[in-house]
Image (cartoon, rainbow, N blue to C red):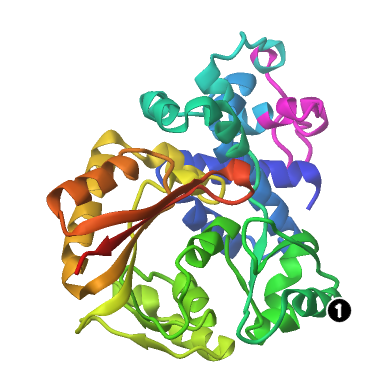
Amino acid sequence: MTPAARHQAAIEILERILAGAAAEQALTSWARASRFAGSGDRAAIRDLVFAALRCKRSFAHLGGSETGRGLVLGGLRAADVPPETIFTGSRHAPAPLTDAEARHSPAPMPETVALDCPDWLAPELGDSLGSDFAAVMQALQGRAPVILRVNAARISRPDAQAMLLTDSIATHPHPLAIHALEVTENPRAVQSSTAYLTGLVELQDAASQAVIEHLAPLEGARVLDYCAGGGGKSLALAALGAQVTAHDIDPGRLRDLPRRARRAGAAITLTDAPTGTFDLVLTDVPCSGSGSWRRSPDAKWRLTSARLGQLIAIQAEIVQDTLPYLRPGGRLAYVTCSLLASENERQVAGFLARTPALALTFQRHFTPCDGGDGFFLAVMEMRN
């Protein structure tokens, strides 16, 4: 496909997303209907679509409209690419610019537009992030780095780097977590690499890895991963010596975990009804996902005040439900990938007020300015 044809495909996919389709669904539907597109075309189109979603407000401002065409046009202007080189009207290319599009001269952007921040959420993000607000929102406008977790139970970080290099995948150690590698060359080859296929590395954000490392010591600890989802944190816990039981309210989300665990050489027990008590209960709760908007940029625009309120209620319910699984002296780890105090510090304050037997022992924020996704961790101990 020509560059112009890729931009036209991005316009069509963005129109479906703006009409209500989920981004991944729209991309998959287009790919299935467009068998002529090679893997390089699909990757380039995905990049165009995700860039437009990350920067929807600013691109619409530059392009003159919040349409697929306006977002792609705005993206070209943001990148200082002459739009007429893409909007040529030739076969499979976007139609030529209209007079109005060519004459569009955008006014200076308000801060929330320039930072691609939803207006309704800006006050809370500002309060939650303080002086880091602008820097964090700017970081969320770019692509997330590709980060690997080295399976410490089976290989060292330097040896993993050497093995990845045999598949032309260059990496360097990431400072946020001791087993993290940032991919600097050939990231799309990771999932076909020997190191990945044999379970020596896993894709996992650096801040997500750091959250697990802050839960040490884990050797021999009985751990319940109560909201395990795909199981990335369960695998990281097991690699550090924990005896992991994985649970999720939707058992279907765990369906790939046994295969991933076998590949990694990890022993993980799956359950839909936990029993007994544990040394550590991990609650990686459903949240706004505001810390990972780079990876799921349409989630930024789909979040509403009502949905945020529902999530906050669900988080509190989950924590309450997990308390019986804590042994005396056991630890409860509350984790979100949110930047919002309403899901983080204020939630923890509520947990402590309602359950005097819990004592806060550790708390930390991670933001995209640290080099990973935005995460929050609070560790609370059940007093004897």
Q: As rendered, which of 121 and 317 lies closer to the eye?
A: 317
**The quarter of the displayed image where residue 202 is located:** bottom right
Is residue 342 shown left or right of residue 297?
left
- Residue that appears at 78% across and 80% down: 159
User: SS class of the residue under badge 1?
Assistant: helix
| Rendered position, 317 above or below 269 | above
Q: Main secondary structure of the magenta part?
A: loop
For residue 272, say whether it is visible. Answer: yes
Across and down, in percent, residue 323 comes to: 19, 67
Does residue 230 belong to the magenta stretch? no
Q: Position of residue 84 (x, y in %)?
A: 80, 26
Which residue: 48% across, 81% down? 238
Residue 122 lies, in percent from the top left, at 42, 25
The residue that label 1 is drawn on is 166
Q: Which residues are magenta?
A: 75-100
- Residue 100, position in %: x, y? 64, 13
Up the image or down, 87 lies above or below 317; here it is above
Q: How many marks?
A: 1
Seen as rendered, the residue at the extreme front is 384
Query: From the viewer's perspective, is 197 left or right of 243?
Result: right
Q: Amino acid at mark 1?
A: Thr
At horizontal 81% and vertical 48% (from top left) the residue drawn is: 2
Can residue 92 be found in the magenta stretch? Answer: yes
Label 1 neighbour load within 10 Å: few <14, some 14-19, many 20+: few
Between 275 and 361, the one lying in front of the other is 361
Instruction: Please tell me whether residue 200 is drawn above or below residue 300 in the rendered image.
Output: below
Residue depicted at x 67% and y 79%: 196
Does 219 sit above or below residue 365?
Answer: below
Q: Quadrant of the C terminus?
A: bottom left
